[in-house]
Image (tube, rainbow, N blue to C red):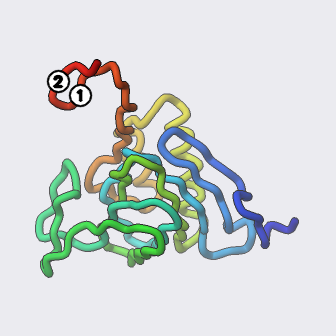
Amino acid sequence: MTGLILPPGQGRKLITKAQEVTFKATKDHGSVISIFEVVVPPGFDVGAHVHSDAQEFFYVLDGELEVLAFEPVQRTEQDWHTWQSPDGDTAVRATEGAFMFVPPGTPHAFRNASDRPARMLFQCYPSPVHELYFEEIAEIWAAGGADPDAIVEMRKRYDVTQLTPQRYEPPALFDPHSSDSRGASKK
């Protein structure tokens, strides 16, 4: 195959515990837009960030994500989950078929607050900024996890100004022999 037509599930994959990214169209294909299929596991929060030059497009294929794309009245450094726009907008629950466009200079974020993976089509202009970004962040995750300082420094090289931390806190697996959320033992 020439790479111009890809069957389902095909493309170069970068798989970490925090994301699975499949490269669909890249600079190597002659594309000025990088296109990826991304699986976002439960508990992953990309953190609010902004790009000075890049434009991004997100389309939810399966599952649900909480998404945000606006300048808030007040930025908070720990998380973006309660941000509000001057018009009263807040983060949106994006389900299958939801779309988000992020122009340059717009703070944005997504997280999977559900208990199952979400899958999205993600496009970034210009190519190859996010291709290189995904390659390097996969190396950071493979080296033992998300060192926050390493991620912030790496992101600076790829037109990403981090506003709140990236987090990956997978939900605890249900254990019928453990305590419930109130601390009561289940038997």
Residue 80 in the image, given as x and y percentages of width and height: 22, 57
Q: Residue at x 53, y 30 (%)?
A: 143
Judging by the rendered image, the residue that carries numbered circle 2 is 183
In space, the residues marked 2 and 1 are separated at their CA atoms by 5 Å
Q: Residue at x 38, y 38 (%)?
A: 170
Residue 118 in the image, given as x and y percentages of width and height: 47, 56
Kind of residue at disc 2: Gly
The quadrant holding residue 146 is: top left
**Horizontal side of residue 88 vs 23, given as left or right:** left
The crowd level at tag 1 (other Cα within 10 Å; few <14, some 14-19, many 20+) is few
- Element carrying mark 1: loop
Disc marking residue 180: 1
Residue 8 in the image, given as x and y percentages of width and height: 72, 62
Kind of residue at disc 1: Asp
The quadrant holding residue 95 is: bottom left
Badge 2 vs badge 1, beta-carbon distance below 8 Å? yes
